[in-house]
Image (tube, rainbow, N blue to C red):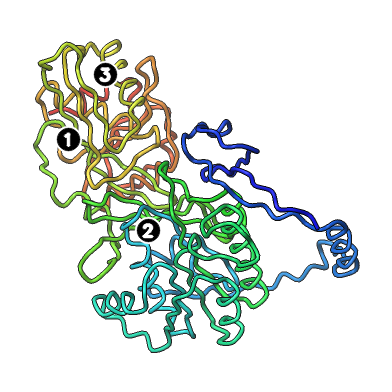
Amino acid sequence: MAKAKIRYVCQDCGSDYPKWMGRCNNCGEWNTLVETVIEATRPGTVARAAKSLIGRSTPLALPDIPADSYQRLQLSIGEFNRVLGGGLVPGSLILIGGDPGIGKSTLLLQASASLAKMGQVLYISGEESAQQIKLRATRLKIRGDNLFILTETSMNAILSQIEKSKPKFLIVDSIQTVYLSELQSAPGAVSQVRECAARLQEVAKQQNIPTFLIGHVTKTGAIAGPRVLEHIVDTVLYLEGERFYTYRLLRSVKNRFGATNEIGVFEMGDDGMREVTNPSEALLAERLPNASGSSILVTVEGTRPLLVEVQALASTTTFGNPRRTANGIDFNRLLLLIAVLTKRVGIQMADQDVFVNVIGGLQIDEPASDLAVAAALTSSFRNRPVAADVVLVGEVGLSGELRAIGHLETRLKEAAKMGFKRCILPASTQLKQLKNLPLQLHPVRSLEEALELALV
């Protein structure tokens, strides 16, 4: 009989080593190796299994494969439908990750109440008792007559209950608490997470049950467990947001049935997660139009345009080395823009403490935000406000030139809908398709020219 082997597996990237090390050589993270028992197969097991599979399936020519259209199931949560690609696909396996306390369980409990109107929902909790879930449901005013709660961590018991009750929808909170008794490793280990997810995938596909899995995240923000867990599932969603902000973003990073990088916007309240159907209006509600150091950016998250306020503050430092702080934008991008403003525009910030913040706790990664950030910095430095009716879009190059960006028509339509009158944009943009928009367009070639137009 073959003996089981002990390996040390990285919880971040899934790399395994024969002995423990303080640092993973693959991803470079410290203290992420966990002792894992890997079961060895008996001699001849793989050969017998391969032999038994012969003849189970045959290749089909592409024209002969039936292309039956699947009917998406619509939840009563419109933002959830948006992120899923238009609704829930039968038999799909969906993984939702996020920081502790961000609202994953709350969102899925609200979603399960919506799903219960279409069929039986089996909510499996390995972290909370049935009484705790009942208290949350009472606070959220969820009745859920067709919603059944099972507090269980044994995968064999869960599979038995699924076979017995035959639910139409399945929710597992969370995948790291479930274990298979055949494996010797502890719950949450790489082998347990991988095998339990594979069993649930098999159930979802064979019985056509849409299945939601909640996953813990590591200290780097990635879903805990090996990367193969994200390959097993059909859709990977992240619930993002700062704990001290009310807004939450449900972001799609993988979707076999829809577009990736799609987002849904929610607001956390006493009665649970509320949809924000017009996030641009919500993000600009407390804006001071004539304040210096503020500019309006039109960013695109997935297919949705968002108007976001970028605030900057430049003040004379009292120390030898000035501080640079960036919230919501890349720190290195901020340093680049400060260097371009100094070299190409003549704004000396060597003795200035610089702080940049994106309102609402959003994280903006696209280069199209460069012009708005540079305008906010210049506005604060010169104490001249940016015009209240103007939006700014454009990437800033190292020579101080403005470069074209994508999805421009979508951005401008959103700006016009929110009441803005003018837009400063790169001169290389094709303007023929933008003539019918109710916006006055100011195409410019350089950052210096854009700043002169933007500041009052």
Q: Which residue is mark 2?
A: 264
Q: Is residue 407 left or right of residue 139?
A: right
Determine the secondary structure under disc 1: strand
Instruction: Name the kind of residue labelled 1 in the image.
Output: Ser
- Depth check, front residue: 223 or 46: 46
Task: Pinpoint residue 377: horizontal percent, then vertical percent.
Answer: 20, 26
Determine the secondary structure under disc 3: helix
Above or below, 37 against 207 in this view is above
Task: Pinpoint residue 64: horizontal percent, then vertical percent.
Answer: 83, 68
Disc with the residue nearer the chain's start (3 vs 1): 1
Q: Is residue 151 left or right of residue 180?
A: left
Disc with the residue nearer the chain's start (2 vs 3): 2
Task: Pinpoint residue 51: horizontal percent, then vertical percent.
Answer: 90, 64
Instruction: Name the kind of residue labelled 3 in the image.
Output: Glu
**Which mark, residue 185?**
none
Q: Which residue is mark 3?
A: 448
Where residue 128 sits, quadrant-wise, is bottom left
The mark closer to the camera, 1 or 2, is 2
Q: Which residue is mark 1?
A: 294
Q: Between marks 3 and 1, how big is the CA–CA gap?
A: 17 Å
Instruction: Please tell me how crowded label 1 is: few (under 14), some (14-19), or many (20+) other residues with Cα within 10 Å.
Output: many
